[in-house]
Amino acid sequence: MLRRRGNLPKIMSATSSNRNNAYVSGPLSRICCIGVLLCSVGLLSVVPSREATAISVEVWYGPEDQPLWRVTQLYDQATRYIYVAVYGLTSPLAVKALVAAEKRGIDVRVLTDRERLNDHKQRAALAALRQAGIPIKINRHDSLMHLKQVVIDDEVNTNGSMNHTTSGNRFNDERVDVIRDHALSAKAREKFLSMWKDQERFVEWK
């Protein structure tokens, strides 16, 4: 039976022959039914997931945010590695930050596109990186290595439209997403390393 104490309903066990059931009427019954329905379709989680983690995403736009300058700030904060896969790399700002990271013992690696070597600015930038001891690989397949991705320390990865160029930083309409998440960064790192180890598709630039 249902007893009311003020305006608060209280569920009591039924006195019928089926003593394992309980009944309730009025608004509370509708609330209970809705809760059961939500649970059945997975819209209401009864037990919080332990696997849920907070993912931080920052969005930078060019030219107003100077996105490449912000990326080089991430290079300055790296403690283990910086893996760069980028189609165009000509900016002295990027070269300086990557060389500085290499000098303080960070594992720096660069993947880029072979067709971009026709640009004398790209060749000069890559030569400066190589002289500093940074290994560089280019694609040997006929398609483009068109990623614009950076992975840092299994904690941060960036992607978007921007190349590592002065135009990409100061003049072009660009977007760079900075994702701070261990799982997604580890996935980006594995993709980079799978390309790095693929001797059929990539070769060291010397």
Image: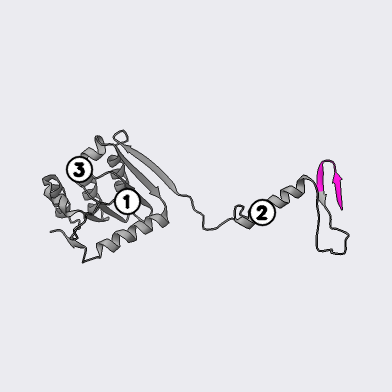
Left or right: where 148 falls relative to 131: right
Checking the image for residue 37, the label placed there is 2
Residue sitting nearer the eye, 96 or 157: 157
**Disc 3 residue crowd, few under 14, some 14–19, many 20+, Cα 10 Å:** some
Query: From mark 2 to mark 3, how far is it between C-alphas?
Result: 57 Å
What's drawn in magenta, residue-wise?
Answer: 1-9
Left or right: where 105 falls relative to 115: right
Residue sitting nearer the eye, 144 or 98: 144
How far across and down, in percent of the image, does residue 165 sit? 21, 42
**Mark 1 — residue?**
78
How far across and down, in percent of the image, does residue 158 sit? 34, 48
- Counting residues from the start of the chain, the first of labels 1 and 2 encountered is 2
Query: From mark 1 to mark 2, how far is it between C-alphas?
Result: 48 Å
Quick one: SS at disc 3? Answer: loop
Position above or below: 33 against 141: above
Which of the two marks, 1 or 2, is nearer to us in this view? 2
Query: From mark 3 to mark 1, how far is it between C-alphas?
Result: 19 Å
Residue type at mark 3 is: Ser
**Mark 3 — residue?**
91
Which residue is drawn at the image coordinates 30% and 56% (left, top)? 81
